Amino acid sequence: MAVIKLQHVAMSYGGKELLSDMSLSLAPGSFHFLTGPSGAGKTTFLKLCYAELLPSTGQLTLFGKDALGMTRDDIAGIRQRIGVVHQDCQFLEHLSVEENVALPMTVSRRPVNAGELHELLGWVGLKHRREALPAQLSGGERQRAALARAIIMSPDVILADEPTGNLDWEMSLRLLSLLTELNRMGKTVVIATHDLNLIRQAKAQVSARVLRIANRRLQHAGADL
Ligand SMILES: Nc1ncnc2c1ncn2[C@@H]1O[C@H](COP(=O)(O)OP(=O)(O)OP(=O)(O)O)[C@@H](O)[C@H]1O
């Protein structure tokens, strides 16, 4: 069963269609890149994938459930199964790195296991920065903290919006290797990016598919990248 399925989905803002007639089925454990020019609608597409937005027309199915018929509880359940790395990280600036990473657990009133939290911070290389405030982090540290927060609930799917946008190549590779490791653990990964070098690099490591949004349509890019 597809984890995320779009059938003839369109999305409009203020009556103007941004995304048209998009159909896609994301298999569990798959790895996709999403490319396209700035403003093409990559972030909007990702927002559909975690039901932050609902389609103007067409059918969106998340883990077998029609997104249009979802209750508040269904959406809360979906949010636990889909971890999102937002383009601008969206930290609470007055909370420490550790508190920000644990936030999805605390807001859903789940107990936070300190040992597991430290292990996760260690995995992204931020154990020593756990008491820092977000403003004190470098760009690469912020992205890794955002990734840790996205996966703290052990989601099945990880959606990352330009996770390497402001990072140098070395840090981009480090983030990519965390995402490919998650994919090897069985997670479905979707990364929106402009960085074709990153895509080429990833294709040497994992079996990644490339999707492209252009002229409002979703295209499956060929193997020529
Ligand atoms: N809530 C909204 N209301 C109206 N228009 C919006 C809204 N959100 C996004 N848009 C518009 O939709 C278009 C696509 O935005 P989106 O952020 O999805 O593109 P993108 O491909 O992710 O761009 P970038 O690569 O620059 O991040 C833009 O023109 C944007 O201004």
Image (cartoon, rainbow, N blue to C red):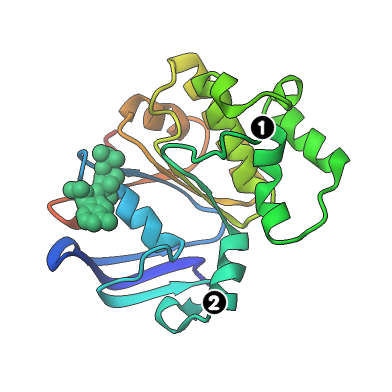
In depth, the one of 51 and 100 nearer the eye is 100
The residue located at (71%, 54%) in the rendering is 105
Q: Is there any visible trace of residue 74 in the rendered image? A: yes
Identify residue type, mark 1: Val
Q: Which residue is mark 1?
A: 97
Left or right of 176: which side holds 217? left
The residue located at (49%, 68%) in the rendering is 2
Residue 157 x %, y %: 56, 55
> What label does residue 72 carry, if any?
2
First reached walking from the N terminus: tag 2 or tag 1: 2
Secondary element at tag 2: helix
Identify residue type, mark 2: Arg
Q: Is residue 221 above or below residue 155?
A: above
Q: Is residue 224 above or below residue 8?
A: above
The residue located at (35%, 24%) in the rendering is 197
Residue 129 x %, y %: 70, 22
Classify mark 1: residues with Cα within 10 Å, few (<14), some (14-19) or many (20+): many
Secondary element at tag 1: helix
Q: Are marks 2 and 1 in contact (CB under 8 Å)?
A: no
Image quadrant where one finds the C terminus? top left
Rendered image quadrant of residue 175:
top right
Left or right of 16: which side holds 105? right
Outermost residue on the bottom side: it is: 69
Real-space CA distance between mark 2 and mark 1, rounded to the nearest whole angstrom: 29 Å
Residue 123 x %, y %: 72, 31
Left or right of 93: which side holds 222? left
Left or right of 17: which side holds 93? right
On whether ligand 1 comes within 8 Å of the CB at mark 2, the answer is: no
The residue located at (62%, 61%) in the rendering is 80
Q: Is there any visible trace of residue 219 in the rendered image? A: no
Rendered image quadrant of residue 10:
bottom left
